Amino acid sequence: MTAGQMPRWADYILMPAINVAAAFFVSGLVVLAIGENPIDAVRILVWGAFGWNEGIGFTLFYATNFIFTGLAVAVAFHASLFNIGGEGQAYIGGLGVAFACLALDRFVPWWVTLPFAVAGAAAFGAAWAYIPAVLQAKRGSHVVITTIMFNFIAASLMVYLLVNVMAKEGSMQPETRTFEEGGRLPLLDTILPGVDFGSAPANLSFVLALLACVFTWVLIWRTKLGYEIRTFGANQTAAIYAGISPVRITVITMLISGAMAGMMAVNEIMGSQHRLLIEFVSGYGFVGIAVALMGRSHPLGILFAALLFGMLYQGGAELAFEMPAITRDMIVVIQALVILFAGALEHMFRPALIKLFGVLSAPATRPA
Amino acid sequence: MFDTLILILDSTVRLSTPLLLAALAGLYSERSGVFDIGLEGKMLGAAFAAGAAAAVTGSAWIGLGAGILVSIALALVHGFACITHRGNQIVSGVAINFLAIGLTALLGQDWFRQGGRTPPVTGDARFETLVLPFADALREVPVIGGIYSELLSGHNVLVYIAFLAVPFTWWVLFRTRFGLRLRAVGENPAAVDTAGISVTWLRYRAVICTGILCGIAGAYLSVAQSAGFIKDMTAGKGFIALAALIFAKWKPVPVMFACLLFGFLDAVAIRLQGQQVPGIGEVPVQAIQALPYILTVVLLAGFIGRAVPPKAGGTAYVKERS
């Protein structure tokens, strides 16, 4: 049962579309079970996300987070590594952003701070992925388990640092001082003329996220390293036979993955919160898994998947307001169903679809 | 000093119970070659179902039954995805965790309108503590009296079930035909298949065992340890259980000791909160909380012994290649 029995467009577009549709269908059943109208719910959701300026701003803001965490998971997927630690890597990445901002914000404008903040986020995120990567590459410890453990270790470490070390003088809040102007990214609507996102925190990080998409595409499909990553992911034995070092590829891929996850913190910390606080990642790292699965690990797919999840997050908030019975937890349910149908059950509809294409193409391929 | 120790050990037993049940649950599934990072989700789903059913019916046992049923249902979703459709076991586990977090909060709010909580359970709707025979009479006897009446007596029935599940699991895995086949299917499914035994059915039975034990673990949280379900009440316990399972190298008796160790760390962390330890000063509680995860990583790295997972774990079995 190979993919060759189906046209490529069916494999890359139709299959994911069917899987996601199944996830939304089941989500609709959940809404029905609660006693609300799913059609109305979708209408409110889409309007809430795209129907007004501030909604669009929030959608873009959330999408920025998902692009970074989605790319993080996707890059690792290409080497057939499962980085489930985006949550912890993003959390630690926040530390890098905060160090840069706290050190520079009083002396220089934001555009001087930005490169340091991005580098800090990437470096700290990558560092948090480094140990699991080395343990996987050199000692065979399963990267899934170690990255899960590192998520929890990161959470404990950050609570300790924010309560005992980095907290503002004389404050009981587990957060740093608020950054001055030099530690704040400009909002998107102040850069783009004629656009107004109201109070939405969509900021320059969105552009950074788009650049990260381009970077990932070039890296994976247009460089020698990317070719090695994909070869290693497709067939480790063949890759080793071809002289590709498994240790090198595992470590480098995980470092890039961790750096991507870490950069999510630029959007949250420097773009919106303007201070480092506990639990700012709040699940974005895990949503990255759904985004990567839905986007089929391709930057363009991830961009669309991230926008869809951004829409769910923003529209879901509106939905919770309009239909109080449907709380924001509905988004988590939809997310779970997307992961289930687009990820774990991705092969469920495949045999039926292959049969269908077989029937459709039979007269054409076999001349009478 | 002795009293303090007994108190800490007493809460160790209480805190290790859900870990022990969940870790033993994971043992069945993972020994059969199906990795399960969805222990957390199954526990959470069961905790909610148990809390809701006990609150509505007023019976803790019906709550336990409901918890087990929901947990089995989630386990079957995992089985359907990973065994029948050969999906990625990690991805499926992640999905189940999210499904449980979302659905429990959503339905909890819809049914009870208490911010995701279930109504508090009291009386018969909750598992009360059992007092072992002569516990009160022996209380005054030095040392033994304290150990017997505080540490061994005075827990609810699920605690005893959890610790009895350890020898039972050992017996099932190492002394029954089912156990032998279950272990074999986790190491070499092709051999089991060649012997004419269905790999699929065997693995399904293994994940159902996982569902039952996770169900008890969840019910323990909401209708035994606490009096009702609270949003996200598992708070990572499923993952600590997973860590304990790995730490114990997938063996039942070591699983119990690993869970007791992690439960002990938790009890100590609660005890030390904000206290000055002579010579050290204030111990950062977060360091103790992170210790189970750090220990597991160190073990996985092979620095203290070596944790080798079941050989066929994580891969779906393909009967024949066409």
Image: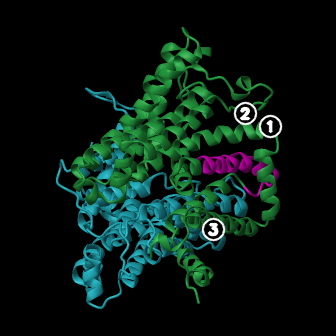
Residue B27 in the figure: left or right of residue A278: left
Q: Main secondary structure of the magenta part?
A: helix
The label on residue A18 is 3
The label on residue A53 is 1
Residue at the spot x=40%, y=42% of the render? A223
Amino acid type, callout 2: Ala
Amino acid type, callout 3: Ile
Quarter of the picture holding the C terminus of chain B: bottom left
From the image, state the color of chain A: green
**Residue B160 seen in render:** no
**Residue B165 seen in render:** yes
Q: Indicate which label's residue lies in the foreground, 3 or 1.
A: 3
Badge 1 marks a residue whose secondary structure is helix
Residue B254 in the figure: left or right of residue A196: left
Q: Is residue B61 above or below residue B176?
A: above
> Do marks 1 and 2 share a subunit?
yes
Which chain does tag 2 point to? Answer: A
Disc 2 target residue: A200
Q: Indicate which label's residue lies in the foreground, 1 or 2.
A: 1
Residue at the spot x=35%, y=82% of the render? B320
Residue projecting furthest to the front: A368
Quadrant for residue B310, please give it.
bottom left
Q: Which residues are magenta?
A: A303-326
